Image (spheres, grey):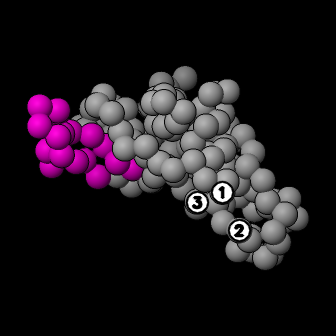
Amino acid sequence: MSARKLPLLEPLTEAFWTGGAQGELRIQRCNACGHWQHPPLVRCPKCHSANLEARAVSGRGMVKTWSVNAQPWQRGVDPTFIFAAIELAEQPELYVLSNVLCAPDDVRSGMPVQVTFEQQDDVWFPLFAPVAAA
């Protein structure tokens, strides 16, 4: 995979981008009402509390919807990748937008996935891979 553009590590988002160093997908949760939210905000949209913190989630989810990119963005690099909305297992409608690591013909809505990480400098990009059927 080619180098990705690095996000800025800001106080509100740093835990999300660096949690992979410990193998954790970290998502913001309200300590007052228990609501998970992503992307992180300064207040909870449910109860308006500012008592928020990034916590590790299971990393499991399912593909809700996706798009296959075919636009060549970099010369000499295969442009094909899957960009998907992953609904995390912790809460309905808790989404992370990321890449799914499988062939474009294999992705489907409802497909179970698990987080994996790709490190680049001080950032661990959360990517998702299909979970084999038990």
Q: Gap in Å between the C-alphas at discs 1 and 2? A: 8 Å
Q: Is residue 113 magenta?
A: no
| Secondary structure mostly seen in the magenta stretch | loop
Q: Secondary structure at mark 2?
A: loop
Q: Nearer the viewer, residue 44 or 63?
A: 44
- Is disc 1 in contact with disc 2, using a CB cutoff of under 8 Å? yes
Which image quarter is the N terminus in? top left
Give x and y (percent) for residue 106: 30, 35
Q: Residue at x 47, y 48 (%)?
A: 7
Q: Is residue 91 visible?
A: no
Question: Would residue 45 appear left or right of 5 to someone viewing this image?
Answer: right
Which amino acid, by three-letter code, is at mark 2?
Val
- Is disc 3 in contact with disc 2, using a CB cutoff of under 8 Å? no
Which amino acid, by three-letter code, is at mark 3?
Pro
What residue did someone put label 3 on?
39
Q: Secondary structure at mark 1?
A: loop
Bounds of the magenta span?
67-84
Give x and y (percent) for residue 120: 45, 30
Q: Nearer the viewer, residue 98 or 42?
A: 42
Q: Residue at x 51, y 50 (%)?
A: 8
What residue did someone put label 2 on?
42
Up/down of 44 relative to 75, above or below: below
Q: Quadrant of residue 78?
A: top left
User: Alpha-carbon neighbours of circle 1 within 10 Å: few (<14), some, or many (≥20)?
Assistant: some
What residue did someone put label 1 on?
12
User: Alpha-carbon neighbours of circle 2 within 10 Å: few (<14), some, or many (≥20)?
Assistant: few
